[in-house]
Image (tube, rainbow, N blue to C red):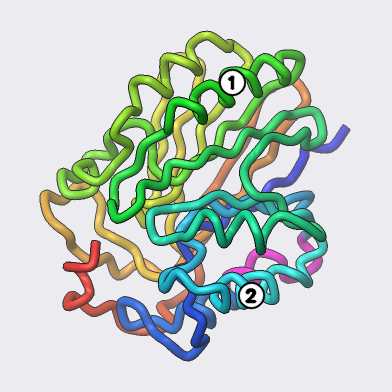
Amino acid sequence: MPAFQLLQVTDPHLFGDATRELYGLNTAESLRLVLEAALGAGRRADAIVVTGDIGDDFSAAAYANFRRALAGCGAPVFCLPGNHDDPALMATLLDDRGFQYCGRARLGGWGIVLLDTHLDGDASGRVAPHELARLDADLHALADVPVLVCLHHPPVPVGSAWLDAVGLQNGPEVLAVLDRHPQVRAVLAGHVHQEFDAQRGAVRLLATPSTCAQFAPRTPGCVMDRRPPGYRWLSLFEDGTLETQVEWLPALVGEPRAEDEARR
């Protein structure tokens, strides 16, 4: 049976006003170009997962713009919140008609669990006790299939001191839950605006570039990267193996501005 094709896009940072820019980029246009590149030439996603920071201005209009951008992709869309999101708005506006907010699902021969790491007023994240309990329950419910766990903040440091300072506060607690469930194959995150790929035992730890601007890896402070918007494909095989690659737009669609760094 062919592998299940999952497209990850992350951190689009959309505004209610689709003409607004972030880091010198029009975020609505960069998301449009990413989807056009990823799904062009007849390439098809079986599902799309969006790992947070969908909005940037906490507006309902930003999520409406997101729905419009994804509506024509022909695949179910799974969403979770980041630190720049409004979880209550997302749960209201992005949980019907082809969109699912958090929760769990079965995708082909795999399971997927989507977690909420949002903390009000804080760039770092935390999986609340009730979410940790749900993670454990969802993994029990998906014990018969390999599982992909998705969240905004990576559960381990990525090697940039400033990003790790606003990472997942209770990453070890999350990993302890995962350790009790050997069917977990990978953890998929956003937040860091760069590619990250590590192995922890049998679990692959992945983070993915933003659909807008990138941060340079392995830096003590915030440094903008010249790499263009990116996205990730994952091929999920029924035997529990996966293949994945990050792809990039051929060029920048704007000019990253250092003056935006302080907002992180």
- Circle 1 sits on which residue? 184
The numbered dot on residue 256 is none
Q: Is residue 223 above or below residue 159?
A: below
The furthest residue to the bottom: 19
Task: Please state the horizontal and vertical placement of residue 44, each as a whole percent of the image.
Answer: 78, 58
Going by the image, does 220 lie left or right of 249?
A: left
| Residue nearest the observer in this picture, 234 or 210 | 210
Q: How many neighbours does mark 1 have within 10 angstroms: few (below 14), some (14-19), or many (20 or more)? A: many
Amino acid type, label 1: Val
Amino acid type, label 2: Ala
Number of numbered discs on residues: 2
Going by the image, does 90 lie left or right of 145?
A: left
Task: Please state the horizontal and vertical placement of residue 204, each as a whole percent of the image.
Answer: 49, 28
Q: Is residue 109 above or below residue 179?
A: below
The furthest residue to the left: 220
Going by the image, does 254 lie left or right of 245?
A: left
Q: How many neighbours does mark 2 have within 10 angstroms: few (below 14), some (14-19), or many (20 or more)? A: some
The residue located at (62%, 49%) in the rendering is 233
| Residue nearest the observer in this picture, 202 or 59 | 59
Q: The residue tagged with tag 1: helix, strand or loop?
A: strand
Q: Nearer the viewer, mark 1 or mark 2?
A: 2
| Residue nearest the observer in this picture, 240 or 144 | 144
- Circle 2 sits on which residue? 64
The furthest residue to the right: 1
